[in-house]
Image: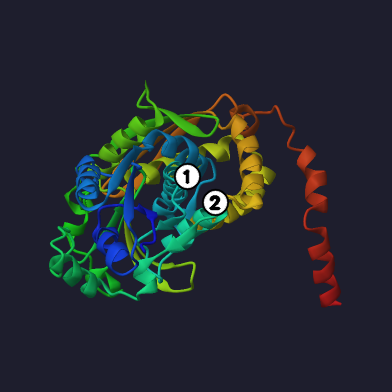
């Protein structure tokens, strides 16, 4: 007797493609339902996943959540200056949303189990499992349960006539959404290997970028971008247009050694042109409108927010509390930031805000609005305890 119905998180890549025959042959499931979630992958990739899911599975869903991804996941990341170990997170932000959509389809279909194609060495297994288990579902994960290698998977796909873009000559694993593109695997697993230009798709080489700096202006309201170069745009459209502009100027590449949740160090290569520009602009605007105490404490909050987001712990009570604090600070993060993009670099050119805590009159050396004599008393007490200790040591 078969094991009934199972829903598979489906990208159309190597891992999830071979999961379909594995769930039938190795696990004995009668009905396999694939779900592809569009968070801003290339249209051709979404189309391939849809076609392949309909061809290989018993039933298939393709769900467009691009706008929701930007509004509910990317915008909070901008407000939190969301970055992990120095790079803007992309894959980590999308996984919980994808998992929630999988759960929704599993509920509609009456499936008792959910499958994914994550390995036992990466982060995604934990991000998916957290959401699936929180919803009360049993999980099937063939890659980790069968301890499969990439080479075995490629051979298995060929034996089952499953078309996949990954092969022994092209072993790279790519994950993409509208906010970020990650590339790993193959020779990139050697930290000393120099990445070839062929792996990049969103950015030109900084050496081949234009020789003239391109200026852009970003307007923010309550901490999120609402206009690009004077043109009001919805979030997804703004990010897509800025990805093009910044990518053409070689902005937004990261090649780094990253600490995964399990403790493994991994070599990761990323492209995130719009994210690089927007986060730089947002941080700068915060320095114009937030107080010193807010900035110091928010940096701590942002770091913890990014850690929880990286882990996919979006239902952790602390995560909700951190978002509440961050949202409060963003009420005054309104204004514009001008930036210069030049051969891979981002330079802040200027900023303005009606909520600025900056006063050119007070800070100017030519102004007498503040009597400089008032600083003498402050100076007498400044560093008092350190001076006392220094004197004691002399004695």
Q: Is residue 143 above or below residue 319?
A: below
Residue 134 quadrant:
bottom right
Q: Which residue is mark 2?
A: 135
Which corner quadrant holds the N terminus?
Answer: bottom left
Image position of 266 (left or right of 378): left
Badges 2 and 1: C-beta atoms under 8 Å apart?
Answer: yes
Q: Residue at x 23, y 52 (%)?
A: 206
Between discs 2 and 1, the one toward the N terminus? 1
Look at the image and tell me whether residue 351 can be seen.
yes
Residue 358 in view:
no
* Percent coordinates x, y for residue 130 in the rendering: 52, 57
Left or right of 288? Residue 258 is left
Residue pointed to by mark 1: 107
Colour pattern of the rendering? rainbow
The residue closer to the viewer here, 172 or 204, is 172
Residue in the image at 19% along x and 43% along y: 44
Q: Nearer the viewer, residue 211 or 94?
A: 94
**Crowd class of label 1 (few under 14; some 14 to 19; many from 20; radius 10 Å):** some
Q: Quadrant of the C terminus?
A: bottom right
Residue 4, how many percent across, how many down?
Answer: 38, 56
């Amino acid at each position: 007797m078969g094991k009934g119905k199972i829903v598979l998180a489906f990208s159309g890549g190597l891992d999830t493609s071979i999961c379909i025959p594995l769930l039938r042959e190795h696990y004995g499931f009668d009905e396999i339902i694939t779900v592809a979630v569009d968070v801003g992958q290339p249209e051709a990739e979404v189309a391939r996943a849809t076609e392949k899911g309909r061809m290989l599975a018993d039933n298939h869903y393709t769900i467009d959540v691009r706008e929701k991804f930007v509004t509910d996941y990317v915008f909070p990341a901008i407000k939190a200056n969301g970055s992990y170990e120095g790079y803007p997170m992309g894959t980590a932000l999308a996984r919980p949303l994808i998992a929630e959509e999988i759960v929704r389809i599993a509920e509609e279909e009456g499936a008792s189990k959910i499958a994914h194609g994550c390995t036992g060495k990466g982060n995604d297994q934990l991000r998916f499992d957290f959401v699936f288990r929180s919803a009360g579902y049993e999980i099937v994960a063939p890659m980790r349960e069968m301890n499969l290698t990439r080479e075995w998977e490629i051979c298995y796909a060929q034996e089952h006539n499953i078309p996949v873009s990954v092969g022994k000559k092209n072993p790279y694993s790519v994950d993409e959404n509208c906010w970020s593109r990650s590339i790993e695997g193959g020779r990139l697993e050697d930290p000393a290997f120099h990445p070839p230009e062929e792996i990049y798709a969103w950015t030109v080489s900084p050496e081949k970028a234009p020789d003239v700096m391109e200026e852009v202006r970003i307007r923010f309201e309550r901490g999120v971008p609402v206009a690009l170069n004077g043109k009001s745009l919805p979030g997804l459209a703004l990010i897509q247009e800025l990805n093009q502009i910044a990518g053409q100027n070689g902005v937004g590449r990261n090649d780094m050694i990253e600490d995964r949740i399990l403790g493994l160090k991994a070599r990761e290569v990323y492209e995130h042109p719009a994210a690089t520009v927007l986060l730089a602009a947002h941080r700068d605007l915060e320095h114009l409108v937030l107080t010193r105490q807010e900035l110091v404490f928010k940096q701590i909050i942002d770091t913890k927010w990014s850690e929880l987001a990286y882990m996919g712990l979006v239902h952790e009570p602390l995560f909700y509390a951190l978002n509440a604090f961050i949202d409060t600070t963003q009420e005054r993060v309104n204004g514009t930031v001008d930036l210069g993009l030049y051969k891979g670099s981002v330079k802040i050119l200027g900023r303005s805000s009606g909520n600025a805590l900056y006063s050119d009159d007070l800070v100017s050396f030519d102004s007498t609005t503040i009597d400089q004599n008032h600083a003498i008393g402050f100076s007498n007490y400044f560093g008092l305890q350190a001076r006392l200790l220094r004197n004691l040591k002399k004695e």
